[in-house]
Image (cartoon, rainbow, N blue to C red):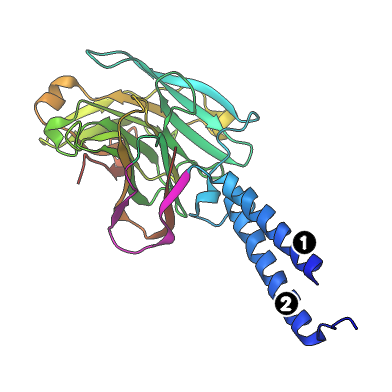
Amino acid sequence: MAERTPNVPNTKLLIGAGAAGLAALAAAGVATGVLRGAGSPSSQPDVASPDAERAIVASFPAAGQAHARALVLQRTPDGYVCLWDSPDGSVAKGLGGCNPASDPLGGRKLMVNLAYDGGPQAASVREARLSGLVSAEVASAEVLMSDGSSRPLRLLRPGTRALAGADYAVIAYRVRESDLRAGATPVAVVVRDASGRELDRQATGIGG
Amino acid sequence: MTRTLSIVAACCAAVLLAAGVAYATTSTYIGPKYWCCYESGSSSYWNQWFEAFFAKSTSGVSDTAITFIDNGVFGYSWHSTLRGTQSFQHIYWDGDRRYTKKSYCKYYSGTTFNGSCTVAG
């Protein structure tokens, strides 16, 4: 006579298996980006999508030992505006990032990235670049240096509306080798309106 | 009963395998977590790491950086460092991949956030 399995253990087993299945699905969802919790790894923008649009909006000319680089503006299909400091114009090799396309400046008048090689001590920094977007009402910008001096930042207006949804000015500045040799590094970027009034500033810096 | 269990186990294994393949060469070395204080963290050392990213729940208000640090060959120097306030920050190791390095991310100032740091190889 065949042995019969009691019903109660079967039910418990099925409930347990179902719970395990749900947990597995949740893990897969997180891993594959289906569940995109803010700040989680799976929340990353789809920067590699073939449907993403991009344009080179500025460049960093070669200087000394430093090679030329391109500044790339990108709009992803999942709603992000990204800015990449890239050695070859590609997004894949870019140093940069993204903000939601609904507000590429994150509620500010400027969004600036500092990319550098060397450090964390200022004296060992070999190369440093500032890149960013600023609001259209910004008339001038400067970078404040650690030695108390400042350097003007040229504002480029390449036309960003198609990708970024508004006309932002663009910053692409390579820190002078002479400044780096002297240990002078960027500590903040300040933007002003046409009257010279400060609109916003963003702290930055090497190491720390 | 045995058949049912086998099917359930196979399904679970398949889903977990799919998840594993999706993240086979990545390591989220911090978070996702609430970043309340100015803190930092780093991944393990490996020569195959070539890109890393910092995902945050805020944009424009949290000053953070992400970088690669070599294992001493170049004096534990920082490489491909990026500092800024964007909600997603990405860096790429454009040098020789034979060099061993780790990724390191740091929260400098500004509004607290939920975030995570991930390195990929």
Query: Residue B29 appears at what percent x and percent y?
Result: 39, 52
Element assignment for label 1: helix
| Nearest the eye: A19 or B30 | A19
Q: Is residue A113 above or below residue A107?
A: above
From which residue to which does the magenta span run? B26-45
C-alpha gap between disc 1 and disc 2: 13 Å
In this figure, which residue is indicated by the disc labeled 1? B7
A58 on left or right of A76? left
Q: In front here: A69 or A120? A: A120
Q: Quadrant of the N terminus of chain A?
A: bottom right
Q: Main secondary structure of the magenta part?
A: strand
Above or below residue A154? Residue A194 is below
The answer to whether residue A90 is visible is yes
Q: A27 left or right of B41?
A: right
The residue that mark 2 highlights is A13
| Residue at x 51%, y 44% (from the top left corner) | A103
| B41 shown above or below A83 | below
Numbered label tally: 2
- Give left or right: position of B73 versus A93: left
Q: Position of residue B41 (x, y in %)?
A: 31, 53
Residue flagged by tag 2: what amino acid is it? Leu
Q: Is residue B90 magenta?
A: no
Nearest the viewer among A87 and A174 is A87
Most extreme residue toward the front is A1
Residue B56 percent location from the top left of the image? 44, 52
Q: Please, what is the three-letter code of the amino acid marked with disc 1?
A: Ile
The image quadrant of residue B79 is top left
Query: Magenta includes B40?
Result: yes
Q: What is the chain letter for disc 2?
A: A
Quadrant of residue A126 in the image? top left
What residue do we see at 34% from left, 15% from top? A68
